[in-house]
Amino acid sequence: MKKQSVVIVGIIAFILAISVGYALFSETITINGTATAKGNFDVEFTSATINTQIGSIGATALISDDKNSLNITVPKLEYPGAYAEIEVTITNKGSIPAILKNIEETGLTTDLSIKVTYTNLQELKEQELSQNGTQTFLIKVMWDENSTTSSENVNFTIKLNYEQTTLQ
């Protein structure tokens, strides 16, 4: 009888241990709380200057009111090979480091006789722009040297798309 009691107690203890173990591992764990990130993301155009005009008259580069886009107008390129060159400075006014993702160009409706090139653009895509940091690049609007099509009223807008940096 004593043996039987010990076996029954052992079986009951085993069943209880399995039940408690199951209850512990099947319990849903809920974590409450909030996480906040402080900082702001604000990369903007801070200057755009017409550096050079060779065979070009009246080129302008105007920064939008929100400082997120740049409108470039080259009203007249006088001959093939004529160009206007604009020096542009970007500043990170926010507190979050950023890196250039791509450039968005809209409104360039001329035919292939106009070439728009960006100097230092690839380097900008590889450099982190830290808080209060600046980056400079050149935009060249040129009448293709091999074109015979007249090129007037070149007008387009660029927007630089930055994203929070993952470099570090």
Image: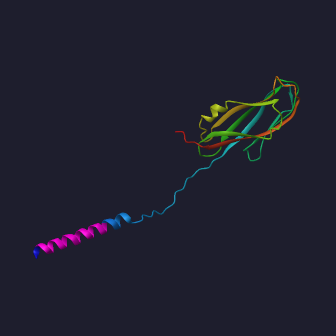
Q: Position of residue 92 (x, y in %)?
A: 64, 42
Its colouring scheme is rainbow
Q: Position of residue 44 (x, y in %)?
A: 69, 43
As drawn, is 30 to the left or to the right of 130?
Answer: left
Image height check: is 38 above or below 20? above
As drawn, is 108 to the left or to the right of 96?
Answer: right
The quadrant of the rendering that contains the N terminus is bottom left
| Residue 13 within the magenta-colored segment of the rendering | yes
In the image, what residue occupies the spot 64% across and 34% down? 124
In the image, what residue occupies the spot 74% across and 43% down? 69
Q: Position of residue 126 (x, y in %)?
A: 60, 34
**Picture quarter containing residue 54?**
top right
| Residue 33 within the magenta-colored segment of the rendering | no
In the image, what residue occupies the spot 70% across and 36% down? 89
Image height check: is 39 above or below 56? below
As drawn, is 41 to the left or to the right of 139?
Answer: left
In the image, what residue occupies the spot 58% across and 42% down? 165
Q: How many marks?
A: 0
**The residue positioned farthest toward the left in the image shown:** 2
**Picture quarter containing residue 59?**
top right
Q: Position of residue 118 (x, y in %)?
A: 71, 31
Residue stretch in magenta: 3-20
Q: Nearer the viewer, residue 84 or 5?
A: 5
State the predominant SS element of the stretch in magenta.
helix
